[in-house]
């Protein structure tokens, strides 16, 4: 009991200190949030790279930090996504599948891959790979913010999201019925007003029965 209540007390004290420290700084936080996303993202990424490297002076720590998302396939091969453009000196644009020994899988997603950052990844029971981020194309095909790939990393042409979103996708969660919850910084989906959260049908079409 002493440990439990000691932990609870420390949490209360910590929250009280954060409240005291942050109340005078509300104006500053609001100004920071007004900084354009691409500038703010670049600064945060730079500080993260510096911090992850100087901890152990190990470039491998930077690689681990650069991975935004990871999903395991049924064959125990991990699929990783992030802002990276290379892995172990192998040019790989923002998504890679690794073999069980940690090396890039050369049979996965040949081509240019995503033209901008990828934030999140999910693997379906059928072996398909769903990715989301700030890209507008994958392997030269138009894919705005979200794409579904076949198990070999090629575009799944049966998954059609249309013009999709007008801004970045941050997270994708697959429901048990195969529908996809997609969250991000968008305000439109296929030209219709949708604020930051939509649900997609298994074929990529917008689920109009889901309105937030």
Image: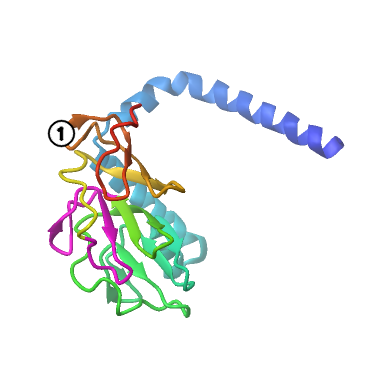
Q: Is residue 92 magenta?
A: no
At horizontal 13% and vertical 62% (from top left) the residue drawn is: 140
Above or below, 175 against 156 in this view is above
Q: Is 26 positioned to the left or the right of 12 in the image?
A: left
Total numbered labels? 1
Residue 164 pos. (x, y %): 20, 43
Residue 45 drawn at (x, y percent): 35, 51
Percent coordinates x, y for residue 89 in the rendering:
31, 76
**Quadrant of the image containing the C terminus:** top left
Q: Main secondary structure of the magenta part?
A: loop
Quarter of the image where the N terminus is located: top right
Q: Name the quadrant containing residue 112.
A: bottom left
Residue extending farthest right = 1
Q: Residues within 10 Å of mark 1 (few under 14, many from 20)?
A: few
In this rendering, position of residue 37 left or right of residue 210: left
Q: Is residue 132 above or below residue 86?
A: above
Q: Residue 50: x percent and y percent? A: 40, 56
The image's colour scheme reads rainbow
Residue that appears at 26% across and 30% down: 194
SS type, badge 1: loop
Residue wearing tag 1 = 191
Magenta segment, which residues? 133-156
Q: Is residue 11 above or below residue 205?
A: above
Residue nearer the viewer, 197 or 3: 197
| Residue 197: quadrant of the picture | top left
Q: Residue 55 or 34: which is nearer the viewer?
A: 34
């Amino acid at each position: 009991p002493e440990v439990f209540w000691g932990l609870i007390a420390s949490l209360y004290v910590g929250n009280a200190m954060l409240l005291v420290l942050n109340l005078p700084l509300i104006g500053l936080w609001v100004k920071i949030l007004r900084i354009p996303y691409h500038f703010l993202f670049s600064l945060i990424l730079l500080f993260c790279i510096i911090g992850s490297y100087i901890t152990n002076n190990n470039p491998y720590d930077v690689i681990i930090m650069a991975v935004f998302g990871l999903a395991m396939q049924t064959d125990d091969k991990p699929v990783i996504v992030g802002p990276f453009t290379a892995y172990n000196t192998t040019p790989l644009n923002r998504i890679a599948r690794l073999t069980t020994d940690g090396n890039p899988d050369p049979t996965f997603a040949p081509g240019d891959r995503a033209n901008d950052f990828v934030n999140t990844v999910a693997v379906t029971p059928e072996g398909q790979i769903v990715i989301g981020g700030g890209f507008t194309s994958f392997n030269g095909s138009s894919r705005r913010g979200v794409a579904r790939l076949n198990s070999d990393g090629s575009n799944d042409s049966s998954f059609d999201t249309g013009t999709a979103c007008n801004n970045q996708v941050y997270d994708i969660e697959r429901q048990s019925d195969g529908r996809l919850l997609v969250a991000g910084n968008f305000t439109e989906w296929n030209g219709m007003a949708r604020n930051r959260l939509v649900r997609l049908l298994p074929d990529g079409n917008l689920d109009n029965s889901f309105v937030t």
